[in-house]
Amino acid sequence: MIRICITLLGLMLLGGCAGKNTFNDLRVSLGLDSAYHAAVVAFNQGQVMEARERLLSIKKEDPDYAKAQSFVKDKVEPARLKLLSYYSHKGEREEKNNHWAKAEEAYQTAATLSAQPQALKKRQASMNLKVRQLRVDTLYKQRKKEDENWLNWKTSYEPPQGLIYDDEAFLKVSNDLNKNLETRLAQTWALAQYYRDKDAPELAWLYADAYLRLSPDIKKAQDLKNAMATALPKGFVLPQEDKKVEGTQEVKTVRVVKTQGSVKNVRRLMNQAKWLEARQGALILRKEGNADAEKLLETIDTQIKKHAEKSYIDGNLAFRLERIDEAVVFWQQAVNWMPHEQIYVNSLRRGKQIQERLAALKSDAKE
């Protein structure tokens, strides 16, 4: 029995915030809850379409059938139509303000609420194209500037007249630059393949193009670039390659204030439980080659992970109790601790979406 409880608890935590409420599915399948009650819980959490799906799945012979049909008619359908209007109008507002990504998300949500989603899906696709176009245009300009700087730096450490051609000081920094350039090349090719496999041809094209800029006449890169150019969505325009990027960025030396990264200061921040600040100081120590840096970082990262996990679990528990605002606060804390942990980011995003839906149901649809 204890083993079963532990398993159920694990499934509760894992299924907390990913799409449809898998915890409710589990309870219904085990006979611990009725489909009707699970639907009401979903509805109260702003999951209108999930509630609708659960209610409509209840068979006529089920004793909850009659009230399920009434709940659909009296609660779910009015809420669905209100949210449909809200997100359709939100998409139009965001589109008008050139907020393509927000407009795409709003149209996508509206489409899931519509009985005839074709027009909304078309507008979503239009916004998606604008998002992809803006992303690539911006990345292309930035990447080209960076690559040109790398190529300039590669040949910038030539010994001046008066020194031998293989002067040690110049040779060392030149070798270091070449090693870094090789790493950049490898990373660039990995990104090109990654986006090819993710069916994002415009980004795969971008990184294949960057690879060729740093290492011309490489057949595999040219083949990938050509293939991705033919796989682009209709209406997508590739950046103009023949336009020269004006100017290059100067190499700026960032002055590091070493007192910020002193071992004493980092330990003081750790004693005060200021783990994020302590981590910044420890990273400076590592950059300076301090022997204590790795051990300090290991201790700090363990504490950061511990705090993030606790905030995430607290958020899940609050969500179970239908305290959405409280759950969002906890998930925000988890993201603050570990901003690159995708499960925390996804939970926070979903929590905010639920907040928005519940607020929309309490307000006028066009607000």
Image: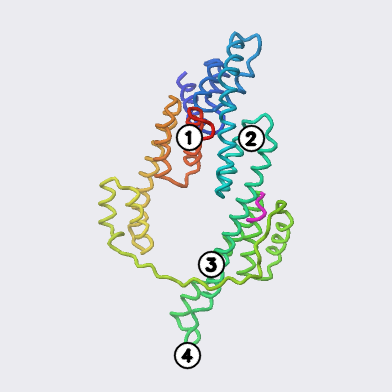
Q: Determine the secondary structure under disc 1.
A: helix
* Left or right of 256 on screen, residue 188: right
Q: Which residue is tagged 3?
A: 146
x, y percentage for residue 98?
A: 56, 50
* Residue ID at (46%, 80%): 170
Mark 3 vs mark 1, foreground winner is: 1
Magenta stretch: includes residue 21: no
Q: Which mark is residue 351?
A: 1
* Left or right of 137 on screen, residue 166: left
Are dots 3 and 2 in contact, CB under 8 Å? Answer: no
x, y percentage for residue 46?
A: 52, 28
Mark 4 vs mark 2, foreground winner is: 2
Q: Determine the secondary structure under disc 3.
A: helix
Q: Earlier in the sequence, mark 3 or mark 4?
A: 3
Q: Earlier in the sequence, mark 4 or mark 1?
A: 4
Q: Determine the secondary structure under disc 2.
A: helix
Characterize the local packing of mark 1: few (<14), some (14-19) or many (20 or more) Cα atoms within 10 angstroms: many
Q: Which residue is tagged 2?
A: 111
- In the image, the segment drawn in magenta is 199-203
Quarter of the figure with residue 169: bottom left
Characterize the local packing of mark 2: few (<14), some (14-19) or many (20 or more) Cα atoms within 10 angstroms: many
Mark 1 vs mark 2, foreground winner is: 2
